[in-house]
Image: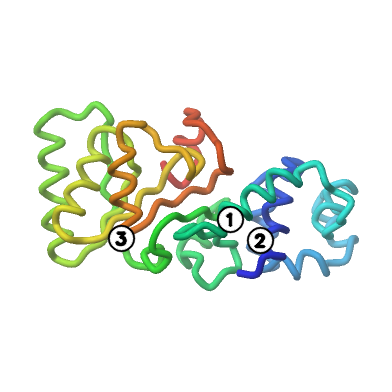
């Protein structure tokens, strides 16, 4: 995805002037940043979009309050194995576009091709029993050996064992996290996160630096 389009998405989200559900709905209807910029103002007003929000959506360059955050994200994306996937990108997961409030942009670390593969989701309690952890590990390992890619959330408990089993089964795994992608939660999974980046990908819908708020785990795609 070209840098201008990525900056457009990042600037709108960083401004916090347009709720993500509204931005997501507009993208679902019109499909791209260019379509939103070219949309007549009257169509925005018909949908209850305010004048200030219209200026932001129309790409008004005078909006500079989020410049530092946007440029930090762009600099992050230029590092090895780091990627920004906008809603209109060909590499954006197609099924994800069809959920309510699809994330306008995704932060990805690792193998970008892993994002488009079919996954077997395996998640569970952070305070799982020893039996539950063993079962999650065994299931993930055997499915991985059979060629399935495992998707989980990098959390303690079942999620951790699911990722470990997938990796020990010589397969790939994706971790959809509830923090900014530059943070690992829980911290003790830092080495596991490195293994996942080498054999799959980490994925987040949240801005860089986002801490592990309860809401991000409940409301994001990580849930």
Question: Against 14, is 103 above or below?
Answer: below
- What x and y, as percent, mark residue 63? 85, 48
Name the residue nearer the viewer: 112 or 99: 112
- Residue of label 2: 6
Q: Is residue 92 left or right of residue 30?
A: left
Q: Quadrant of the C terminus?
A: top left
- What x and y, as percent, mark residue 178? 45, 39
Q: Is residue 114 left or right of residue 4?
A: left
Q: Mark 1 or mark 3: name the one nearer the start of the chain.
A: 1
Q: Quadrant of the N terminus?
A: bottom right
Crowding at dot 3, Cα within 10 Å, few <14 / some 14-19 / many 20+, comes out as: some
**Numbered tag placed on residue 220 in the rendering:** none
Question: Against 160, is 187 above or below?
Answer: above
- Residue of label 1: 105
Q: Mark 3 or mark 2: name the one nearer the start of the chain.
A: 2
Secondary element under disc 2, as helix, strand or loop, is helix
What residue is drawn where x is 48% and y is 48%? 204
Mark 1 or 3, which is nearer the eye?
1
What's the distance in space between the residues labelled 3 and 2, CA to CA? 26 Å
- What x and y, as percent, mark residue 186? 36, 31
Secondary element under disc 1, as helix, strand or loop, is strand
- Residue of label 3: 119
Q: Is residue 172 left or right of residue 211?
A: left
Q: Is residue 77 left or right of residue 193?
A: right
Secondary element under disc 3, as helix, strand or loop, is strand
What residue is drawn where x is 87% and y is 56%? 60
Marks 1 and 3: CB-CB under 8 Å?
no
């Amino acid at each position: 995805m070209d840098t201008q389009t990525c900056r457009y998405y990042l600037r709108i989200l960083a401004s916090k002037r347009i709720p993500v559900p509204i931005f997501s709905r507009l993208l679902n209807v019109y499909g791209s940043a260019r379509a939103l910029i070219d949309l007549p103002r009257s169509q925005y007003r018909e949908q209850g979009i305010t004048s200030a929000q219209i200026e932001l959506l129309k790409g008004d360059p005078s909006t500079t309050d989020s410049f530092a955050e946007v440029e930090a994200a762009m600099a992050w994306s230029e590092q090895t194995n780091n990627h920004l996937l906008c809603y209109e990108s060909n590499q954006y997961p197609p099924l994800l576009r069809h959920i309510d409030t699809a994330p306008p942009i995704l932060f990805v670390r690792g193998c970008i091709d892993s994002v488009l593969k079919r996954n077997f989701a395996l998640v569970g309690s952070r305070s799982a029993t020893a039996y539950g952890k063993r079962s999650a590990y065994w299931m993930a390992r055997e499915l991985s050996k059979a060629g399935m890619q495992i998707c989980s959330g990098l959390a303690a408990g079942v999620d951790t064992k699911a990722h470990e089993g997938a990796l020990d089964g010589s397969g790939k795994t994706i971790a959809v996290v509830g923090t900014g992608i530059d943070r690992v939660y829980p911290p003790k999974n830092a080495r596991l996160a490195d293994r996942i980046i080498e054999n799959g990908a980490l994925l987040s819908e949240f801005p860089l630096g986002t801490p592990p708020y309860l809401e991000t785990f409940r409301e994001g795609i990580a849930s």
